Amino acid sequence: MSVRITALTDPEETSAGRRLVWLACGPDGRPVGSAFLRLFTKEGQRHLAELDVQVHPAERRRRAGSLLLDAAVAAARLDGRRAVISQAEAGSPGAGFLIATGFRAVLALTYARLLPADADLPALTAIAEKPHAGYQLAAWEGMVPDELADTFVASRRAMDDMPMGAVDYGTVVWDLDRVREAASAIAARGDVLHTVAAIDRSDGSIAGFTELVVPGSGTGDAQHYGTAVLPEHRGRSLARWMKAASIIQARERHPHLAGLLTDTADNNPYMRHVNDELGYLPTHTAHEYQLDV
């Protein structure tokens, strides 16, 4: 089958990155696949690109995926990137394709889901209401309140040492503009960002946070975006405390949610243990793959 690859213009561009797009079409002009390449533009990640290649199942093994990959890798190399990453579920055709084309597995992720209706509410309430000496919980929806904005930005460094396996991920540098942009992007697509934070009573600074994005309809699955505690505040069960409070709030505010989704690196046993304690059940494993260009 003769496949034609066409480069498209993607209007989705933010201060954190821009995307390049290619469409694969068969001889009759019918689309058979696509590739999206995100080029990160923030300081600390300008060496990196993220790839998503999709080919219709009926059109696989006819070179569409390989041609899309070639176009994307060439663009990444031309833009001065040294690494391209992509994710695929373990054992899937996508994983086989990435391995066959030179990508290597650099990080394993366990995905898990909690059914709100099946959650152990008394146990979660006991965790959320247990006092933590020197700390208090705060919560907000959407953009962080002005009075907490500076300390929330500072707390984002809690993600800097998040276990990432062998992924050449670089360092994500956060400032207030990036925080605002992330919250605005979630709101623009109609979703709701819920944040729970642990605050150090001694100086009012944020010691850790957990974020949950809920569909605007209040139905379907919500997605945990990140849970992190600053190194100097670890060992006090703050992550477990914040996440339990987040689950309870989600149940109360969005009673029709089907589930809460989370994913954790396999080399992050502490957070995996927290998720297990709170009732999350593993659903599948995926891997991050990396190609050095």
Image: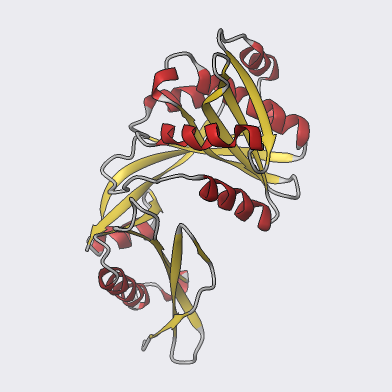
Q: Residue furthest bottom?
A: 28
Left/right placement of residue 102 relative to residue 37 reads: left
Q: Please indicate, yes or no, whether residue 10 appears anywhere in the rendered image.
A: yes
Q: Is residue 274 above or below residue 262?
A: above
* Residue 244 x/y as whole percent: 61, 23
Q: Position of residue 266 (x, y in %)?
A: 36, 34
Is residue 277 visible from the viewing direction of this image? Answer: no
Residue 194 in the image: state x and y as whole percent.
Answer: 65, 38
Residue at point 46%, 69% (across, down) = 57
Q: Residue at x 36, y 75 (%)?
A: 68
Image quadrant of residue 59?
A: bottom left
* Residue that appears at 51% across and 38% down: 153
Q: Measuring 48% from the left and 59% from the top, which residue is drawn there? A: 15
Which colour assignment does the render follow? secondary structure
Quarter of the image that includes the N terminus: bottom left
Tell me: residue 51, above or below residue 111.
below
Judging depth in this view, the residue of 106 and 118 nearest the camera is 106
In the displayed structure image, the side of residue 195 where residue 282 appears, left or right: left
Q: Is residue 6 above or below residue 91?
A: below
Left/right placement of residue 254 relative to residue 81 reads right
Task: Please identify the quarter of the rendering in which residue 210 is found.
Answer: top right
| Horizontal and vertical percent position of residue 157 | 42, 35
Residue nearest the observer in this picture, 260 or 168: 168
Q: Quadrant of the C terminus?
A: bottom left
| Foreground pick, 11 / 55 | 11
Question: How many numbered circles does the render carry?
Answer: 0
Q: Quadrant of residue 49?
A: bottom left
